[in-house]
Amino acid sequence: MNEQVFIKSLPCGGDFLYTKEPCTHILSWCLMCGIVGYTGNRNAIDVVFEGLKTLEYRGYDSAGIAATGEVLQIAKTLGRVANLKEKLPSEIVHTAIGHTRWATHGKPSLCNAHPHLSFDGKIAIVHNGIVENYAELKTSLTRQGIRFASDTDSEIIAHMLALSNASDFVQAVFEVARALKGSATFLAVREGDEKIYCSKCGASLHVGHKQGESFATSDTLAVCDRLDEVIPLEDGDVAVLSRDGIRIFSDGKEVCRKAYKTNRNLPKHSKLYMRSEIDEIPRTVKSTLTEFVPQAHALSFEKIKNADRLYFVGCGTAFHACLFAKRIFSRLLKKTCEAIEASELDETLMSNRDVAVFVTQSGETADTVLAAGRCKGVGVYTVAVCNVPNSLISFTADDAIYTRAGAEVAVAATKSYVCQLSLLYQIARCITNSPLSAVETDNLVEGLSLATNLTPVIENAESKNLFFIGKGLDFVTAKEAALKVKEITYKMTDAYSAGELKHGPIALIDDDSLAFVIATDEEDKSRIEATTSELRSRGATVVALSAVGDFGADKTLHLPALYDKNLYPALAIVPLQTLALELSLRLGLSPDKPRNLAKSVTVI
C-alpha cells in the first residue's frame, strides 16, 4: 500500500515514530521454501512439524528441523515432511525452527537441506532467498579455514553468525544481514538459547505472539489456527522471539509494527485436493462476487477509468486471467489495454498516466511483486488482484482487491483462476456503472455447479497428442487448459487460435491427435465449424465444449447457458480442469503435487 507512518507504544514503554522504507538492494528472492519457527510451552518439534506439513502445498524437495535447548539438534530428510517423523528427537524441547526447501543452489540432497549448522555446531539457520554475492562471501570464509558441508548459498549465513565479533547476537544478525546482497530472510537459533532470531529482507516473514507462545513463518497458513493476528516484518527488520513476547528492531532501534488479522482458514483434509477445489468453485465464486465492496476501491476505479493505458500483469495461470481482462476491459471501457507476463514487463515504456493491475493468487509471486515495485518507481498507479490478505503484493501495490477462493492446496490453480476471472469482470462492470446483478451472479453460480460435473474425457485420451483450440475469449480458455494438462500430466500439449491453426500448427495433426475445441460465442461459430472440419479431415478426434450447439465434432459437451457470454471463460475452463485431473490420475501421477512445481513461484 502507500507509504504510511504509524505511531505505536513500545512494549518497553514510550512511543516510536517510523516510516515504511523499502529494502533498496533486493533484486530477487525465492519463497517457494517454507519457514516455520516456534518457541513456547508446548513441544516445539511437534508444532514446527505440523506447520511444515501445512506448507507442503508450496512445493519442496527436502525438509528439516533444528531444535535447541541445552543442546542443538538437527533432523533432515529428502522427500516428504512425513519422512522427518522417525528422525526427530524424542525429548521435549521448547524452541525449534523448520524449513521445506525448493532447490536453487545445489541439487536436492541431505547436505543441501536446511537447517544449516555453523562450523562450530552451535548455530543453526533456515533461509529463504537467493544470496547474490554468496560466491564472494564463500571465498572469503574459505580463506579463513571454514569448510562447507553443502552447495547452498544459505550455509554462509550460519558461518558468518558464528564468526561475528558483535557485542550481542542481535547485532550479529544485523551485521550479517547487511553483508548479504540479494535477498536473505532467515531464522537462527543457538545452542543453550531458547530465543529465535529473525531477519527479513525480500522474502516474506510474519511473526506473532499469543499466551506465552511466539511464532515465525513465511506463510500465515502455517499459524492461522494458532494466531488471530500476525505482524508482517519489513525489510531490514530483526525480530527476537521468546516465550515472553516479540521484540522488533530496525536500524538498531526497537520499533513496533502493525499487526493484521490472519483472515485465513486451514483447508479441510482431502485425499485429492484438486478435485475438492474444483467442487468448491461455485461457492468461492459466489463469495468473491457477493463480498466485493466496490465503494472501497473508488479511487482505483477512477484511476482505471481515466488511464491512458491499462496493463494487466501476471505469471502462469494468473497471466491467462490477464489475457481475459485485456479483452474485457478493452471491450467495455473502449481503452487501450495490454496483458504482459510479469518477467517481460518494461516499465520504461509506461508513464504516471497509466494504471497496472497485478494478478497473483499467493500475493508473493516474485516476478509479479518486483514488476509492481518497478512500476511504482516510475509513477504508475498499481492495483493488486490477490487471494491472500496481507501478502507481499498488498503492501507493494497502491490498492489490493481480494478474491475469496480460500486456501488452495493443489499446485495447479483451479478455483482461484475462476475467482480471478469473475472478480476482474465484476470490476470492469462496476467501472462502467453496470455491476453484475444478483440474477446474473446466481446464473453464473448455477452454471458452475453444473460444470463441475461435466467430464470431456474419452477413451485412451492419455495416450493421444492433445490440442486445445479456441477463438477470442475461448482462446484464453484453450491456453489455460493446455497449461493445466502440462502441469499435472507432463504431456507436451499446446493451445492454438482457431484461425491460426492452418498457418503452421496443422502440420502436427494426425490420427493420434485429440483436439478439444471451445466455442461459446455464436459470432465465431462458422470459423469454428471450418476449423473442426480441417481437424477431422486430417485424422484428429474432435471433442467440442460448446455453448452454440453442434458444429461437427465427434463428441459435443454442451455447456450450461449463461446470461452474459463474457463469463463463459469462467465456466468453460471447469470441465477442462477435470480433464487434466482425470488424465493425471490415469497416468498414475500425483495431481496435487506435480514434479518441479511449487504453489508460490517466487524465484526469478
Image (spheres, rainbow, N blue to C red):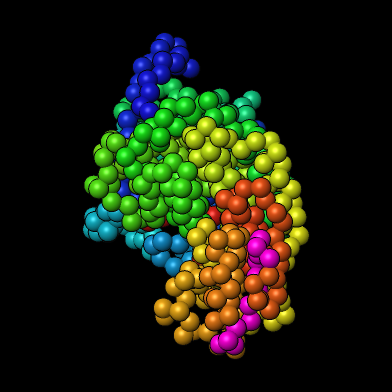
Q: Quadrant of the C terminus?
A: bottom left
Q: Which residue is at the front of the view, 86 or 114?
A: 114
Q: Confirm whether the magenta stretch covers residue 540.
A: yes
**Extent of the magenta region:** 536-549
Is 186 positioned to the left or the right of 460 in the image?
left
Magenta residue check for 96: no
Kindly identify the residue that appears in the image at 43 percent across and 27 percent down. 299
Task: Examine the rendered structure and indicate whether residue 267 appears above or below residue 589.
Answer: above
Q: Is residue 486 visible?
A: no
- The residue at the point 41 percent across, 30 percent down is 302
Q: Place residue 2 in its image quadrant.
A: top left
In percent of width and height, residue 552 lies at 65, 76
Q: As rendered, which of 43 and 29 lies closer to the eye?
A: 29
On the rendered structure, is 6 left or right of 463?
left
Image coordinates of residue 601 in percent, x first then y, are: 47, 55
Quarter of the figure with residue 517: bottom right
Residue in front for this viewpoint, 410 or 360: 360
Q: Nearer the viewer, residue 445 or 189?
A: 445
Visible residue check, residue 536: yes
Q: Quick check: 389 above or below 337?
A: above
State the image coordinates of residue 37 (x, y, percent, origin top left): 54, 41
| Residue at the spot 29% in from the left edge and 36% down from the top edge | 353
Residue depicted at x 40% and y 12%: 15
473 horizontally vs 457: left or right? left
- Residue placed farthest to the top in the image? 14
x, y (%) of residue 279? 73, 53
